[in-house]
Image (tube, rainbow, N blue to C red):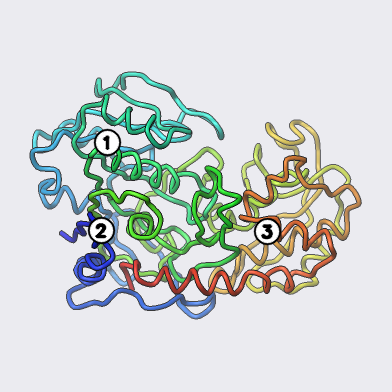
Amino acid sequence: MSRTNLSGPSRRGLLAASGAVVAAGAVGAGARPAAADTPPGEANGQGNGQANGRGRQGRQVRTGFDRLVADAYAPLAGQRVGIVTNPTGITADARHIVDVMHADERVGLVAVFGPEHGFRGTAQAGGSEGRYDDPATGLPVYDTYLKSGQPLADVFTASGVDTVVFDIQDAGARFYTYIWTLYDCMGAAALAGKRFVVLDRPNPVTGRAALGPVLDRAFATFVGREPIAQAHGMTVAELARLFNAEFLAKPVPLETVAVSGWRRADFFDATGLPWVPPSPNMPTPDTALVYSGTCLFEGTNLSEGRGTTRPFELLGAEGVDGRWADAANALALPGVRFREAYFAPTFSKFQGRTVGGVQLLVHDREAFDPVRTGIALLVTARQVWSGFAWRPDNWIDKLTGSARVRTMIDAGASTEEVVGAWEADLAAFREMRREYLMYH
């Protein structure tokens, strides 16, 4: 079992000393932490995972939870445990980890903490399930959504737990809120004097590279608390290590349980693990592949495909026609083509109305850069459709992490000019990120 313990003012030194142990448990004895980003196109991530939990080349991928069970819950011995999770917290054979833990006398599970969309996943975007007792287990379920700091610390205190465990499947984008639930829960656990254990899961879109603009703290919200890249290229345990050492004012006593058998170049289908939608509009790993770029359309008056069967792969608005697909295809962006598309969302923007736009068709996911593609689609949409507008609240600034993308596109900048403007910040983040990577 690989675990990292972090606490106190010397946490950066402890991280450096323990990183090799974590990496060894994750990728094999003697391994070193990954050293650098691998740009798109330079690593082979194709694979045909099987439902039995074995990835390509016969490697068995085991999540942090599965390894925790194999270690007889050793990190949780003698503790009253609460877990932050949602429907993605499942075993390789698709049992929910709360049901498994509740039935196992070796672990003292006493509380569940639900994030956005809720523990059982019944709420849409911007919603949660509130406080209730879980009918299946009788466990109290506490709502963490939009709570942070002392109010969230008070929830942990009221629950009576000694240790807070986190196990949620991420989608790999800065504005996917579960990583900030992680951040807020770590900070609140520190305030409440609780231990914190992160059970790792693979990044579904690989951990090869960090991509896109880095957040300016002046634009911090729940879709981005701290200055990380738009596509961070990290697992939740790696992010927890980074948060604890770089960003939290008071670090929490932290342990991470690594995934075994996963490589940074692996896409989700290479893992053999079952996919559970981590939120209602993240139905497949294909959605996650494009999400870190096309979610930017939430900041515009175009539909980002919510209310369709291909959210974030279908984009459009009333009055958009085939000129958009033509303009996007003319850029010859690596790994992706665009189809002229028409659709009628069943909810959200343009509910029940037919709109025109594009469908993204990723034909080479190794070469595909989702953030560059998202910027190119914003630039071309503005060029070909006179009705293009940003959301009045400038939500695009919160998604991209500053006003720079919006103001540059409004000034007529090209895709390459917009992308080039964040390269220095991205290079600095990539260098900082290296220290916390746990896998090759």
**Percent x, y of residue 129:** 44, 25
How far apart are the two marked residues, 3 and 1, measured between alpha carbons?
A: 45 Å
Residue depicted at x 72% and y 49%: 315
Front disc: 3 or 1: 1
Secondary-structure class at tag 2: loop
How far apart are the two marked residues, 3 and 2, measured between alpha carbons?
A: 47 Å
| Residue 147 found in image quarter | top left
Q: Is residue 159 above or below residue 162?
A: above
Residue picked out by circle 1 = 192
Residue depicted at x 20% and y 70%: 17
**Percent x, y of residue 13:** 24, 68
Left or right position of 219 against 17 = right
**Most foreground residue, 229 or 128:** 229
Residue picked out by circle 2 = 9
Q: Are marks 3 and 2 in contact (CB under 8 Å)?
A: no
Residue depicted at x 32% and y 28%: 154
Where the N terminus falls, by quadrant? bottom left
Where the C terminus falls, by quadrant? bottom left
Secondary-structure class at tag 3: strand
> Which amino acid type corresponds to the residue marked 3 in the rendered image?
Leu
Q: Is residue 49 above or below residue 330?
A: above
Left or right position of 169 against 335 = left
**Tag 2 or tag 3, which sits nearer the N-term?**
2
Q: Is residue 10 above or below residue 130?
A: below
**Tag 1 or tag 2, which sits nearer the N-term?**
2
**Percent x, y of residue 283:** 52, 45
How far apart are the two marked residues, 2 and 1, measured between alpha carbons?
A: 18 Å
Residue picked out by circle 3 = 360
**Most foreground residue, 424 or 52:** 424
